Image: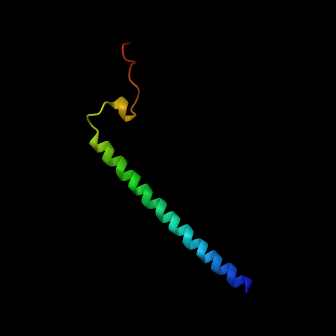
Amino acid sequence: MVTDDSSRGLVRQNDEIQQAATAVNEMTAAVEEVARNAAGASPGVDPDRRGGAPGPAQGA
């Protein structure tokens, strides 16, 4: 029956969307962890090279 086919299709699509959302959430968590680790590992790096506020031009 068409209704049953549509229902199965919607359930399958919903499952795929939930899997994609889970993957995005896991990737976001991983990116945040990398960012935290990078920030914690770089206290001795020149702020201009870390993407901080630009300083005066060299030689000025």
Position above or below: 57 against 38: above
Q: Is residue 22 above or below residue 58?
A: below
**Residue 22 drawn at (x, y percent):** 47, 65
Quarter holding residue 9: bottom right
Rendered image quadrant of residue 10:
bottom right
x 51%, y 64%: residue: 21
Q: Residue at x 40, y 18 (%)?
A: 57
Which quarter shows the C terminus?
top left
Residue at the right extreme? 2
Query: Height in image: 52 above or below 39?
Result: above
Single out the residue that lies furthest toward the bottom. 1
From the viewer's perspective, tell me whether residue 5 is left or right of residue 51: right
- Determine the image quadrant of residue 50: top left
> Which x, y percent locates residue 26?
43, 61
Q: How many marks?
A: 0
- Pinpoint residue 5: horizontal percent, then vertical percent: 68, 82
Residue at 74%, 83% in the rendered image? 2
Compared to residue 59, the image places residue 13 above or below, namely below
Residue furthest out toward the left = 44
Residue at 40% across / 29% down in the picture? 53
In the rendered view of the protein, which quadrant contains the N terminus?
Answer: bottom right
Going by the image, does 6 lie left or right of 34? right
The way the protein has been coloured in the rendering is rainbow
